[in-house]
Image: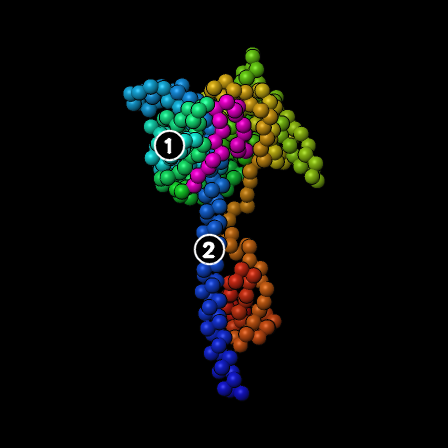
């Protein structure tokens, strides 16, 4: 009998060793897949806002003619100190690769913004050869979100991500981001909750006679009551008259706003194209302290065995091996 026990130990130890190796590989792959997905989700769109309409000397401090303008939009705030024109490539429909002459987070560079980079340069021609792809090819980093933002973020190197969601010149602007904000970021002077929205390019009022302070009446916020969306019109609008693509909507309802919409033909981009009807979900998250936490959340315990590989109850004062559905194995001793 003693001989048989030794045989079982000899064969079970390599099995556990193999499981441990598979465990490490599985966890590393899960981490990598999660990081890659978070990175890719960060880049929302490019917007071909202007074609040969911006002065290069004034904006890029370089001699030359008129430049194209392309806002590139991100879900997470960017680290301005890591931003460079060499971080980006723009590919036109003929496959030509263009590097911007200069880039800037301005004018949308207040705390709680910093999600739109304006690329300036030559990126193609609107009708015959438009831009079709934007790539991040340098070490461009996100930053942690600030206190008062409902969106989670962390420091991520965005090098290597790309998007083919490039909005053509003739299309009007649309919403690409919304989050709940409070504290020092909140510029509303009244109301019970504030929703920050961002457009994929700069906007101004489209309807004759409107000013930016009139735009609140065209936005609608929605709360969710057992699957039924209840509309709420903001009582006012803040963060205006600063020539960027962000607004703050001030609501008086205590019901949580989960979605925002905007009526068509109410705002226009710098090319004077009006918006279509647009809507966006309000972003929020449950913070995770690390990618490891994300991986831990996903795995499920499927078996508990003892040192000989026999199925076991969760006994105290002896080593047990906990086997999870992702292939990981943990050794635990519960002391009494």
Q: Which residues are magenta?
A: 161-178
Q: Give the residue drawn at x 58%, y 62%.
A: 301
Q: Assess whether residue 162 is covered by the magenta stretch.
A: yes
Q: Residue at x 41, y 31 (%)?
A: 94
Relative to residue 159, is residue 231 drawn left or right?
A: right
Residue 229, quarter of the rendered image: top right
- Left/right of residue 174 with respect to residue 130 in the rendered view: right
10 Å neighbourhood of mark 2: few (<14), some, or many (≥20)? few
Above or below for 293 versus 168: below
Quadrant location of residue 86?
Answer: top left
From the image, tell me which residue sits under label 2. Answer: 29
Where disc 2 sits, the SS reads helix
| Residue sitting at x 47%, y 31% | 166
Nearer to us in this view, 125 or 165: 125
Indicate how the structure is coloured in the image: rainbow
CA gap, disc 1 and disc 2: 34 Å
Which percent across, then down, holds residue 148?
Answer: 51, 37
Q: Which mark is drawn over residue 125? A: none
Instruction: Between residue 321 and residue 66, name the one nearer to us.
Output: 66
Report which residue position mark 1 lands on.
Answer: 96
């Amino acid at each position: 009998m003693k001989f048989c026990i030794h045989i079982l130990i000899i064969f079970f130890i390599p099995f556990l060793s193999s499981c441990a190796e598979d465990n490490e590989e599985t966890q590393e792959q899960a981490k990598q897949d999660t990081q890659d997905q978070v990175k890719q989700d960060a880049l929302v769109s490019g917007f071909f806002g202007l074609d040969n309409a911006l002065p290069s000397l004034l904006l890029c401090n370089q001699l030359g003619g008129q430049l194209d303008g392309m806002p590139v939009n991100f879900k997470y705030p960017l680290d301005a100190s890591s931003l460079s024109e060499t971080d980006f490539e723009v590919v036109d429909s003929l496959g030509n690769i263009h590097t911007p002459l200069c880039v800037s987070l301005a004018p949308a560079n207040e705390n709680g913004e910093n999600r739109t980079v304006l690329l300036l340069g030559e990126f193609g021609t609107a009708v015959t050869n438009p831009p079709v792809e934007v790539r991040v090819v340098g070490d461009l980093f996100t930053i942690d979100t600030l206190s008062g933002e409902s969106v989670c973020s962390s420091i991520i190197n965005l090098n290597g991500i790309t998007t083919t969601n490039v909005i053509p010149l003739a299309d009007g602007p649309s919403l690409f981001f919304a989050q709940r904000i409070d504290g020092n970021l909140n510029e509303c002077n009244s109301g019970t909750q504030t929703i920050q929205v961002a457009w994929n390019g700069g906007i101004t009022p489209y309807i004759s006679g409107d000013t930016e302070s009139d735009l609140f009446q065209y936005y609608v916020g929605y709360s969710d009551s057992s699957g039924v969306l209840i509309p709420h019109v903001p009582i006012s609008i803040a963060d205006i008259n600063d020539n960027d693509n962000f607004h703050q909507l001030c609501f008086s309802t205590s019901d949580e706003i989960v979605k925002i919409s905007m009526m068509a033909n109410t705002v226009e981009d710098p090319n004077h194209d009006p918006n279509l009807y647009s809507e966006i979900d309000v972003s929020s998250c449950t913070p995770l302290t690390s990618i490891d936490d994300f991986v831990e959340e996903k795995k499920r315990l499927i078996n508990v065995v003892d040192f000989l590989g026999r199925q076991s109850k969760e006994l105290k004062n002896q080593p047990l091996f906990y086997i999870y559905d992702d292939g990981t194995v943990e050794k635990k001793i519960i002391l009494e």
